[in-house]
Amino acid sequence: MTKPKKAKSYQAPRGMHDILPEDQKYWRYLQKKAESLLEDYGFDRIDTPILEDVDVFLKGVGDATDIVSKELYTLNTKGGDHLVLRPEGTASIARAYIEHGMHVRPHPLKLYYWGAMFRHDQPQRGRYRQFFQFGLETIGDASEAVDAELIFVGWRFLESIGLKGINVQINTIGDQNCRPAYIRALRDFYKARTKKICDSCRERIKENVLRVLDCKEPGCRTIMQEAPQIMDFLDVDCKNHFRRVMEFLDAADVPYVLNPYLVRGLDYYTRTVFEFVPEDRADGAPVLSVGGGGRYDRLIELLGGSKTPASGLALGLDRIVAELKERDISVPDTVAKPKVFLVQLGDAAKRKSLPLFEEIRRAGIRIKSSLGRDSVKAQLRIAHRLEVKYALIFGQKEALDGTVIAREMETGVQENIPLEKIVDELKKRLRE
Ligand code: HAM
């Protein structure tokens, strides 16, 4: 006898995960908190497609970055378009800004977005191939106050959800006037040490030398301590810009640390860059930033718009949810709990249950039911589990009489109430 073939068991794609009903409260809570804070700070929501033309990121984020050279999900459509699943939101926002002629709107334009991003990275704890970001972009203002405001709002958001002790690391990477000299000095420094650095860094020297400062290899990190630092190459304008960002942060009491090796993995940055990094972990595992951003004064021009300064940040929501859970921070469930459960028995009652349920729901009373079930016992068990105040028992007799039994769950006291009075009666009793 041939063995029956075992059915294939399907799983979510590697590096991607489901968000189950029991975890939804974290996401609802974060979205609610974010929306109220961002409304106060004058940000408007924008949504862009998950797919974009590949060039938006090749040009915008930079073809030498890991995100673009190694991690893009690409697809050729039947119509011949070359699209990618967006790896981040900033370049998409810049594309939308140009496409919709938003330069005519009052500036600065303050936008925020919330959505899934995709990077074909090596999956590990906290590093996914599909992850959610919420991001803010302030477009059309070159002032250092904007950078400080974004850092402040990001930090405030994290504080407001109970994530204390987040390290704000900041740095500047200069601009097109002063950075080239730094890059030359850095390349010369590393070229003289190619034998002592890792293979990836040897590649980075050719392609994108700033990224060597990001290397986590112990040998490379030791060498990094002696590498030239951007501070010594900044021109007066960049130096002043950075100093003023720090003055704003001091005045707003945002605790920050200067990290001269912070360069970020996207090419569009100019001047200020920053990251939000949780405290070191007790188990010694590497800490991953929960957010990051910076100024990008040339991105819009690079994508075909006019010269427009801008600055922004994005927070990684999967990592934030993981931090909340790890720190045992409980979040309120913003979905109101049901107060009433409708128990039905028999065909006539079952048929009339849906309109009754709807009438009570429309009156603003949180009600639940399980219309598919027949057993009263099973339905009352659900009512208990949901901790409702009242169960409405609607059987054959009640359906004929035009009444319903209201059972107070705590005391077990039951009372027969005419159907036309049930809404008012429930309202009265639930107010008490
Ligand atoms: P990013 O640093 O690439 O910046 O991403 C921002 C945040 O997204 C990270 O700090 C992290 O929390 C989360 N994140 C990134 N990659 C992953 C991943 N593979 N798995 C889980 N979480 C991840 C940007 O995306 C820029 N667009 C930020 C920005 C906005 N700059 C200016 N405006």
Image (spheres, helix red, strand yellow):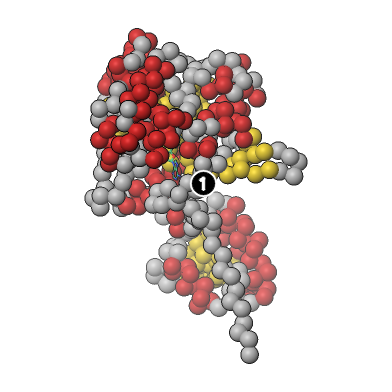
Residue 153 screen position, x and y as percent: 39, 30
The quarter of the picture where residue 177 lies is top left
Closest to the observer, 185 or 1? 185
Instruction: Describe residue 420's horizontal placement relative to residue 111 as left or right.
Output: right
Residue 36 screen position, x and y as percent: 45, 35
Instruction: Describe residue 179's horizontal placement relative to residue 391 as left or right.
Output: left
Kindly give the residue lying farthest to the top in the view shown: 236
**Regarding ligand 1, which quadrant of the image does it lie in?**
top left
Which residue, given by chain and number where applicable, does mark 1 sit on? 120
Closest to the observer, 209 or 404? 209
Q: Is residue 401 above or below residue 41?
A: below
Residue at 43% x, 35% y: name it: 203
Kindly give the residue lying farthest to the bottom in the view shown: 1
Q: Secondary structure at mark 1?
A: loop
Pointer 1 local density, CA inside 10 Å: few below 14, some 14–19, many at least 20? some
Q: CB at mark 1 closer than 8 A to ligand 1?
A: no
The answer to whether residue 352 shows anywhere in this view is: yes
Residue 210 screen position, x and y as percent: 39, 28
Q: Is residue 205 above or below residue 380?
A: above
Instruction: Describe residue 56's horizontal placement relative to residue 297 as left or right.
Output: right
The quarter of the picture where residue 162 lies is top left
Residue 393 screen position, x and y as percent: 54, 71
Residue at 51% x, 56% y: name it: 14
Residue at 56% x, 68% y: name it: 9
The answer to whether residue 117 shows anywhere in this view is: no
Report the label total.
1
Viewport quadrant of the N terminus = bottom right
Viewport quadrant of the C terminus = bottom left
Name the residue type under label 1.
His
Closest to the observer, 233 or 93? 233
Residue at 61% x, 78% y: name it: 5
